Image (cartoon, rainbow, N blue to C red):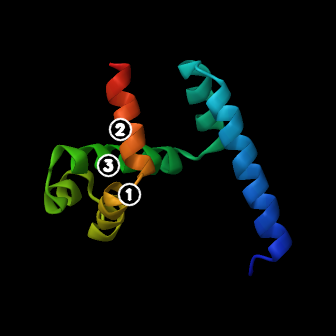
Amino acid sequence: MEMTEEMKIRSESGFNELCELLAKTDDVDFLKDFLTCLLTKAEVYDLANRWLLVKEIDKGTTQRDIAQEFNMSLCKITRGSRELKKENSAFRRMLDFQKQGK
């Protein structure tokens, strides 16, 4: 089924609303409960591993080592690496945010 323009707009609106709500809470337990209700176990696993691969790329771990450790395709890892290298990268900003919180 092809996504109509109306469906795209509705989806983007829902995504924006979700991001705004997530940004308003600092209750980690609540966020974990919410995300595990919203996502399947496989989606939670995938999301967590994508974040971990970004951290590994930042540490300088080779893509091949990451692929082996996380049983991930090089394509996903390459995408993460490209995103991390972009100017004003959201990945970089989140990593910096995490480092500042420690």
Q: Is 14 on the left-hand or right-hand side of 27?
A: right
The amino acid pointed to by label 3 is Val
Q: Given contact means CB atoms under 8 Å apart, are the residues at marks 1 and 2 in contact? A: no
Q: Is residue 20 above or below residue 79?
A: above
Q: Is 49 on the left-hand or right-hand side of 71?
A: right
Which label belongs to residue 87?
1
Q: Given contact means CB atoms under 8 Å apart, are the residues at marks 3 and 2 in contact? A: yes
Q: Is 98 on the left-hand or right-hand side of 38?
A: left
Q: Quadrant of residue 31?
A: top right
Residue holding disc 2? 95
Q: Is 1 on the left-hand or right-hand side of 88?
A: right
The mark closer to the camera, 1 or 2, is 1
Among the two numbered marks 3 and 2 on one chain, the one whose residue lies closer to the N terminus: 3
Q: Given contact means CB atoms under 8 Å apart, are the residues at marks 3 and 1 in contact? A: no
Question: What x and y, as percent, mark residue 47?
Answer: 46, 48
Which label belongs to residue 54?
3
